[in-house]
Structures are given as structure tokens and as C-alpha cells.
Amino acid sequence: MYRAVVADHILFDECIYLFRPDENHQLNKEEESSFSYLLTSFELPTSWELPNCKIHPSITGNRAGSNSVFICKVDNPKWCNITNSNLYGIALAAIVTFVTGRPCKSTRHFYFGETLTPTDIIDLATTHPILIAGPGATSTRPSAATLQQYQIEIAKLISRLYSVPYPTYVILMQAIRLIHLSQVNKRDDFGLAYLLAVSAIEAVAQKAINKKALEKKHPLESEWSKRAKEDSDFGELFGAYKEARSKNQFLKERFVEFINKFAPSSDWENIVPHQFQDYVDSSPKFHSYLLEKQLDEKYPSDLSKEEITKLISDLYTHRSCFIHRGEQPPHQHPLSYNRFFQEHREYKERILKESLLPNYELLIGIARHSITGWLATIKT
């Protein structure tokens, strides 16, 4: 069931179940059409035909200053009705964000009409304003080739989401939502965005990697087990030890193993687009040099296996520091000045400590590649 009055709040479970209803959810039995709105961070000049829906070309609305809004009307599937139409748009926004790496949103209610008035456009502009000029501006005009690739990948992902077993679909949508929330909150709080991206990977890793395969028993455990049968006091202590061990689900180890298996470092150079890619696509003859590796820039292929393992493990550690202490990740730059990594230096107790940090774009690329890599192994 869906709330009759959303009260300007989102419950994403409703969006999950409307995007792909299960047998327990009542579908729209009338022949009425419904629609939603997708607020993108890029211009869409042509329609996208996707499984069960169609995204129309964007309408651009300008705001005071250097902000714009890009509004795409979405033709919803037949099973949606007018009063829950926005729920479909929210789920679709999460999927489009996940695939493109470009933040998208939808509306928290269904009150907008099929034809937008100037006032409607102003209201939507406040929902998802996009900075188009100045420091931190967004590149809003992907090349035609990039947009076509987005459409293909979004359609492929939606088809897979409809074909996998329903419990698996729910797990995937929850992880996709975490990536979505990471992207739309990055400008407000880098640490929160980092937390959500790492959590998305962890959520699927717990399903994909069996903790028993990583469990390492103490070499004396068989002897302790024999002694526990003879000594009740020791047996009680041994039972507490095993209970504590079972609660430690080797979350970091599963996290590292999941990335190594489904997004190995050998793939990283193919999953992170260069920050100047859109610019070069517009004029490759004159600007292709911008994509070349800089002399002081490190690529994944420059790192040893041990360095890669430490870098992945540190992702989890920095996430835990944010959760438990509110401590931000040590990144000095929220934007990519190098393609993959940032070099971090700090003095602790008069000792210089250096570390290599993955850029946010690499973290998102790893999350997307590992989750979709695992999805490809699921039987339909």
C-alpha cells in the first residue's frame, strides 16, 4: 500500500515497490496515463526510450545568478496512477544517477500538471538547482556519444532489475539509493557522501561474499573445544568467545574481497572518465592532449598489490571514523585535480605521514562497477 498523503516526505520503500511491483501490491487497473518529472544535471536534447517508460527532452529553466534547472517529463508505466506517479520518478532518478554519475532528482509530490507553468518551473528550480558557471560548475552538455551510452546502460540495468529474483532486486535498489543519496549530498557534506558510497558497496558485499570463507580460527581452538567439555567455567568462557567471533562478521575483509573480485584495480582506469572528457569530445582534434597522464600523476597501474589493498581497506576505515566520531575523510579537495588519487601529507607527533587517497569519482566508479559486476552473476 502507498500513503494517500505523502506530506512532503519520501519513503523509498514505496518507490522500490512501485518501480517493480510484487504480487502483494495493487496495480492501477484504469487506462489512465501518468507521468513524473526527472530533474537532471545535464541537458537531454532527445528522448530516451527505456523499458516501461520514456524520458522526454529536457526543458531548461534559468534562475538568478549562475544556476539552471533541467526538467524532463517522464511517461510512467501503465501500472502507476496519478496519486503515486512521483514515486516512480524518484526510483528512476536513483537509477539514472547511479549509471551516469550525474546527480538527478524527482519531486516529493505529484501536484505538478502535465504542462508546466512558469511558476512550476521556478518551484522545480529550487528542488534541484545546477551551478553552470564559476568555481565548482557542472558540465551540463555531455557529448552525443556519451548520452547514447548512458541510455544503453540505463536500459540494460532496468531490464536486469526486472529479471532478477525480487529479494535481490530490493537489495540492489537499496544500494542504488545509497549511491544516489551520496551524489546529491556531496556538495553539502563530503564525509556523508563518502559514507553513503562505501555503505552501498558494503551492503552488497554482505550478500555476495560468504563470511565463512574469510573466517580464520585460532590455532588452539580445537584444544579449547576439548577443554570446554571438561571444564564448565572454561566452557562458558569459550562459548562467549565464539559468540563474540560470530558477531564479528569480518565486514572490512568482505568489503575488500568484494572489490577485489568485482572491481579489481586492473579495471579502474576504464571505469573513471577523465574530468575533461566532455570538453575533449566537443573538439578532439585540438584538445586530446588534455587526457594525457600528467608527469606527477599516479594511476592504479603504478601501485603495488599491497598499496591497492591498503587503499581499499582505508576506504572502510575512513567511513568508520565518520560514523563513530563524525570525523571527515582526510581529503583536501572534493573535486578531481588528478584523475584517480590525491596525495595526503600530515604531521603527527612531529612525524610526516603520507598516504594516497582515492578521489570521490574513483570511489563512485568502484561502487558502480562492483555492484553491476555482481549483478551480472545473478541467475534470472
Image (cartoon, helix red, strand yellow):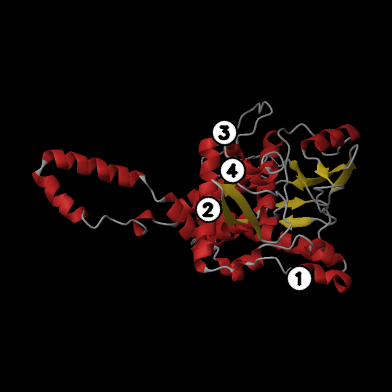
Quarter in which the N terminus is drawn: top right
Dot 2 alpha-carbon crowd within 10 angstroms: few under 14, some 14 to 19, many 20 or more: some
Q: What amino acid type is highlighted by mark number 1?
A: Glu
Position of 206 with respect to 216 (left or right) is right
Q: Nearer the viewer, residue 138 or 94?
A: 138
Characterize the local packing of mark 1: few (<14), some (14-19) or many (20 or more) Cα atoms within 10 angstroms: few
Mark pair 3, 1: CA separation: 53 Å
| Residue wearing tag 4 | 16
Q: Which residue is mark 1?
A: 292
Kindly give the residue lying farthest to the left in the view shown: 230
Q: Are marks 4 and 1 in contact (CB under 8 Å)?
A: no
Q: Nearer the viewer, residue 78 or 166?
A: 166
Judging from the image, what secondary structure is the residue with disc 1 in? loop
Say which of marks 3 and 1 sits in front: 1
Element on which disc 3 rests: loop
Q: Which residue type does callout 4 highlight?
A: Ile
Q: CA distance from mark 2 to mark 1?
A: 28 Å
Question: Which label's residue is closer to the chain start, 4 or 1?
Answer: 4
- Residue type (three-letter) at the residue carrying disc 2: Asp
Residue 77 seen: no
